[in-house]
Image (cartoon, helix red, strand yellow):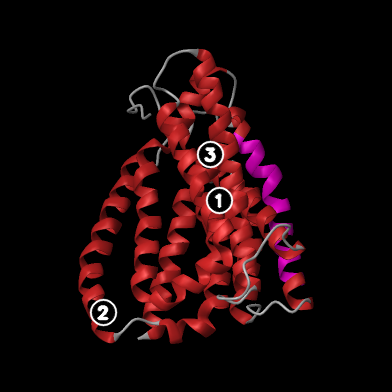
Amino acid sequence: MHAFWYGLLGALFGVYLVLDGTVIGAGMLLRACGPGERARRATLTAFGPFFLGNEVWLVVTVATFLAVLPRLEGPLFRTHHHLVVAALVLWTVRDAAVWFRSRLERPGWRRGWDRVLTGASAAFAVALGLLVGNVVTTTPGSEPVRMPFGWYPLLWALTVTVVLLVHGATFLVVRLPGDLSGGPLRVARRLALPAAASYAVLLGAGLLAPVPSQGTAAVAAEATAMVALVVSARIVAARPRIALALTALAAAAPAVLVGLSLEPVAARALAAGSALDALAGFLMVVIPLVLAVQAWTWWAFLRRIDARTPVFF
């Protein structure tokens, strides 16, 4: 039973990183897809159909975590509350920029919110990476982690940021019209190998340094991410959809590391059997429904946008 619930939580978090990672990466690239309002409007339209649906997975993940592991929430938040609060604030600012950017047609207003969206997306990716690195290297309930962070969490911050940038760029190659996809294509090609190198450094550091979660599964996840990024760099121009699936593997890898680091304490923090039975009945309805809606959304909209595509935000 413990393995089932823990695996479900890991899958939910991994799905969130994969799906919202496209928006985080696209947000960082908003001002790099070409000059003028058309390019930025196209970028917003590219991720518009998926934006709210992607965030549902974060809500489902957090709600499931609180219900399944109620005795782990307090110690985990006490240890990492600075990063958790920072990530939530940046997530809110990123979302506000998406919503407010097009409320007025004044160029100065839109340029300002463009900068906010780009900066908040990058900072959110950094915060997620720092959170992953610190969760992997600390024990829940220990002294709160404070600035400055060690080299290993900083390396995770760099890795997550670059990986999500590549993931978002690959997504934009799939979605943007041909005359606007050149910038994201260059980013996807140029940064995929550095992103793979970052995973290689993490892999080596985990083998050489005393990182608690660096077992066989962690090595396999990081190695898979490395290979996926290398292959995606070679095929993104000709097979962007396959490249997007490969970068998704790299984006999901941090969920494996977080899961492995918390697994030793998760069994002791599991909710009572009656609570889990009630939750199972609820999730048996909610998760298939969310999956069905998401599957339809991606099937319907994961194609190159054109003049007939609905405009979002």
Instruction: Return the residue at label 2.
Output: 275
Instruction: Return the residue at label 3.
Output: 26
Task: Tell me the amino acid under the disc marked 3.
Answer: Ala
Task: Tell me the amino acid under the disc marked 1.
Answer: Ala
Instruction: Describe residue 132's horizontal placement relative to residue 292 as left or right.
Output: right
**Among all residues in the image, which is located at the extreme top?**
106
Instruction: Describe residue 285's horizontal placement relative to residue 181 as left or right.
Output: left
Task: Tell me the amino acid under the disc marked 2.
Answer: Ala
Quote the CA–CA distance across marks 3 and 2: 39 Å
How many circles with numbers are drawn on the protein? 3
Relative to 118, residue 2 above or below: below
Q: Position of residue 95 (x, y in %)?
A: 44, 39
* Image point (72%, 74%), residue name: 206
Residue 102 is a magenta residue:
no
Q: Which label lies toward us, 3 or 1? A: 1
Q: Which SS class for mark 3? A: helix
Q: Which mark is residue 86?
A: 1
Relative to 130, residue 111 above or below: above
* Image point (45%, 31%), residue name: 44
